[in-house]
Image (tube, grey):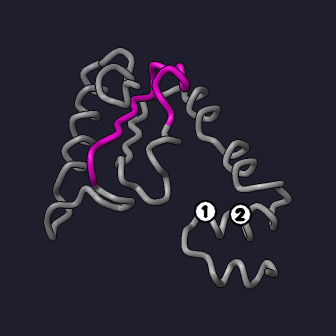
Amino acid sequence: PSRPKKIKEAKYLGDIDEHFIARVYDYESKEHYYRDNCAVKPLSDVAVPLLVVNADDDPLIPKHVFPTAEEVGNSNVRLELVEGGGHCGFIEGVAGEGYMAEQTAAFFGFVAAGGEGAGEGGGKED
């Protein structure tokens, strides 16, 4: 089928990436596009404490592409892969309180207290 037909028939975001995004930006495939736009290189260059949180059920950033601490190799980066939450999850109430607010406050407290190596603790271990 033609590219517009494939896009119209897409059932998954990866289908759109394969038949539209990769082609628009001159990539051979969605895998080529993903490899070229991977977060590992920018994360390895981070010079300040950084907390990166992702849910293991995020439909846009699946857990198998979430980098490990070893891949990033930067003690300034703390990676947290948590159970549940989806793509825009972690909110537990109308005021926006919940897991993300708690983790952000704890991380800022750690940094403000002079914590060494933001990457210590948490994150995907495999």
Q: 87 and 4: which one is in front?
A: 4
Q: Is residue 57 left or right of residue 37?
A: left
Q: Residue at x 29, y 56 (%)?
A: 85
Q: Position of residue 68 (x, y in %)?
A: 47, 28
Left or right: where 11 falls relative to 4: left
Rounded to the nearest angstrom, the CA distance separating label 1 from label 2 is 6 Å
Classify the position of the N terminus by image quarter. Answer: bottom right
Q: Quadrant of the C terminus?
A: top left
Residue 45, percent from left and from top: 61, 27
Q: To which quarter of the image does residue 16 belong? A: bottom right
Taking the spot 53% from the left edge, 19% from the top edge, the residue there is 73
Please state the horizontal and vertical placement of residue 56, each as a whole percent of the image: 36, 47
In the image, is residue 19 above or below residue 48? below
> Is disc 1 in contact with disc 2, using a CB cutoff of under 8 Å?
yes
Q: Residues within 10 Å of mark 2 (few under 14, many from 20)?
A: many
Dot 2 lies on which element?
A: helix
Amino acid beneath label 1: Gly
- Residue that mark 1 sits on: 14
Identify the mark at residue 18; answer none if there is no mark: 2
Three-letter amino acid code at disc 2?
Glu
Q: Is residue 83 magenta?
A: yes
User: Residue 31 location, x and y as percent?
Assistant: 70, 49
Q: Which residues are magenta?
A: 67-84
Say whether residue 30 is magenta.
no
- Toward which corner of the image does residue 115 lie, by quadrant? top left
Identify the residue at image location x=36%, y=53%. 57
Q: Is residue 103 left or right of residue 16?
A: left
For this orientation, the residue located farthest to the top is 116
- Which secondary structure lies at badge 1? helix
